[in-house]
Amino acid sequence: MFYTPPPRAKSRRSRKPRVLALANQKGGVGKTTTAVNLGTALAAIHKRVLIIDLDPQGNASTGLGLDADARQLTTYEVLIGEASLSQAAVEAPVPGLFVVPSTRELSGAEVELIDMSRREHRLADALQALQDTWDYVLIDCPPSLNLLTLNAFVASDAVLVPLQCEFYALEGLSHLLHTVERVKHALNPRLEIQGVVLTMFDKRNRICDMVASDVRSHFGDKVYETVIPRNVRVSEAPSFGKPVLLYDWRSAGSQAYIHLASELLRRDARVAA
């Protein structure tokens, strides 16, 4: 089902969506889970949200209940110029939430993009047509620095970093921040770190407390107050093709993502003021 956007109120000062890349160069940190559930929480409070699945694994698409045979137009077609984002966007099982799906075919896009003009700007160019369509665009990046991730960073206003509470977290985060700075200076001067979200927090584990304390001491108010707990319901939800807020909205994980969405909106309101 293609999305036909409703007219946006004339009084809005800016018609551009807020574009956030969810990225971490380490896999298994809750990046896709955060993209899916943050998008769901934002849609639940009446924001119009588009999730762009830019990971060839397609986990965000699966987590939103999209069967592989339903992914007729994907981020692959968007990047190589065979489809627009509006054509590729399909409705998720949450009012106001849409997703541009991904398949493993996307892994071959890098080879094709190498010889294309504006190869790092393909996604940014595609987003230009959506200025009056969405409140938020969340880009679920692959867990590595490659041409797909560069496209996400060039297209984004900011990077949101999900960070697992484990021993090597700070080392990976420092590397990512260095990458963001390089992209900012070379390709996208408006790019910034929007925030760091601590994920998979287990209050019974002393390492989690130590990591959280270290991250907050190094990065201060860039770290969200909201912490996403390690939660069975969050882990189970993708196997049912649902965000955890639909699977069990009463769970600790669901409530954490609702709080995260509220905190994100407060931060962005301060930036816009």
Image (cartoon, rainbow, N blue to C red):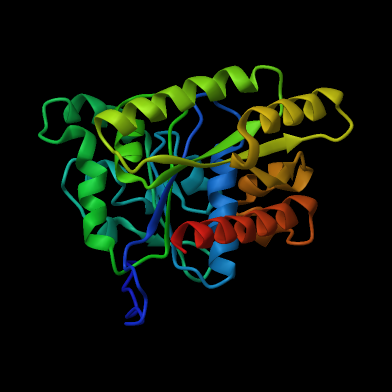
Which residue extends farthest front?
Answer: 273
Residue 172 shown left or right of residue 4 in the figure:
right
Residue 259 shown left or right of residue 181 in the figure:
right
Residue 20 drawn at (x, y percent): 43, 48
Residue 200 shown left or right of residue 131 in the figure:
right
**Residue appearing at x 55%, y 63% in the figure:** 42
Residue 211 drawn at (x, y percent): 74, 25
Determine which quarter of the picture holds residue 55. top left
Q: In front: 209, or 94?
A: 209
**Residue appearing at x 74%, y 31% in the figure:** 212
- Examine the rendering and report whether any part of residue 250 can be seen: yes
Residue 51 drawn at (x, y percent): 43, 53
Which residue extends farthest right?
Answer: 204
Residue 167 drawn at (x, y percent): 71, 18
**Where, quadrant-wise, is the N terminus in this rendering?**
bottom left
Determine which quarter of the picture holds residue 171. top right
Q: Is residue 101 above or below residue 111?
A: below
Q: In front: 166, or 273?
A: 273
Determine which quarter of the picture holds residue 191. top left
Number of on-image labels:
0
**Residue appearing at x 58%, y 54% in the figure:** 38
- Examine the rendering and report whether any part of residue 236 can be seen: no
**Residue appearing at x 61%, y 54% in the figure:** 243
Q: Is residue 26 above or below residue 242?
A: above
